[in-house]
Amino acid sequence: MNVTIKDVAQRAHVAPSTVSRVIADNPRISKETKERVFKAMEELGYYPNAIARSLASKMTYTIGLIMPRSAEDAFSNPFFPEVMRGISVVAHNEKYDLLISTSGNEEEEKQAVINMVKGKRVDGIVLLCSRTTDELIPWLREEKFPFTVIGKPLDSKGVCWVDNDNIGASRLATNYLIKHGHKEIAFISGSLEFVVSLDRLDGYKLALEENNIPFVKELVAQDEFSEDGGYNAMMRILKQKKPTAVVVTDDIMSFGVIRAAIDYGLKVPQDVSLIGFNNIPLSAYANPPLTTIDISTFELGVKSAELLLKILKNKDYIADHIIVPVKLIERKSCIKR
């Protein structure tokens, strides 16, 4: 026999309308009454209807996650599953579900967000990356819809975002190689359409400038965030210059850089040292184990979800940002020159 709200009300010694208000998380209901109703629900095995709950509270208790294009590539990079794990932990603790949107191009991505917002399918959105030409951020801002961004937006006015100090992190990585005696240092990143790539390029340039090392454009290459992308970028550099060290802004790309060096007859780190970014689990098992910048990917997810929930609980929440610290993880891919 199906358990009803009336059964729960009878067990908890309250009115059925009170049970409905508890399900809707009405703040006017006392903590004691809520506990009594929840206990009755548990004893009777009653599960609130999600649609009815949404109608009562005008909340979906769902957070939308917007995956970057293309989703297939995104899921192959450990950064995104790890950042999503951080978001899901916070969502679970606050009894929120996640709705993940994938797309193949910019138009599909924007349409997915419009469907989420206009269809009232989610209470808020987390954008998992920040682009230099991003139509989603100004649209969401204009709609006054709650959202956070992982990655500093190019125009951060009125936007809540979470990121590392990417200029400082790249400066740290480059200075580490300089302190190891390297001067011919290459820089490999993802596309410069991503703000993170621009910031890390700036950090690399800053470290060179501070150490009176000239910037050489032939030592810089961009490609997709993948092993093949790292391989192709390194090969393009090696055809023009022979760096003694490389800053690679993604560990997955670093694996491709190592493969390119080997194919070119170079040994890592004997001929070319390498420092990566993200400290993915596989980086410790690479050959050689990767020295890398740990950007606390899980924490980026946690903080982005926590920030979104603050907005949902306070519609007048003032736009804020959170900087998650990074740390250098020393392994075996760098040696002194």
Image (cartoon, rainbow, N blue to C red):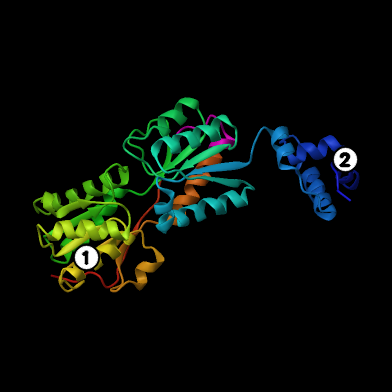
Q: CA distance from mark 2 to mark 1?
A: 70 Å
* Magenta stretch in the rendered image: 311-320
Sequence-wise, the earlier of marks 2 and 1 is 2
Q: Which mark is residue 260?
A: 1
Residue 210 x, y percent position in the rendering: 14, 51
**Callout 2: helix, strand or loop?**
loop
Does residue 318 belong to the magenta stretch? yes
Image location of residue 63, percent across then percent down:
56, 42
Q: Position of residue 91 (x, y in %)?
A: 58, 49
Residue most toward the top?
A: 142
Q: Which mark identifies residue 291?
A: none
Residue mark closest to the camera, 2 vs 1: 1
Residue 36 appears left or right of 333: right
| Number of disc labels | 2
Q: Residues within 10 Å of mark 2 (few under 14, many from 20)?
A: some
Residue drawn where x is 41% and y is 29% of the image: 138
Q: Is residue 31 left or right of residue 330?
A: right
**Which residue is labeled 2 in the image?**
14
- Is 95 displayed left or right of 127 in the figure? right
Residue 251 sits above or below residue 116 on the image: below
Q: Quadrant of residue 59?
A: top right
* Badge 2 amino acid: Val
Quarter that holds the C terminus: bottom left
For the residue labelled by badge 1, is the local secondary structure a helix, a strand or a loop? Answer: helix
The residue under the point 29% across, 65% down is 255
Q: Main secondary structure of the magenta part?
A: loop
Q: Name the residue type under label 1.
A: Ala
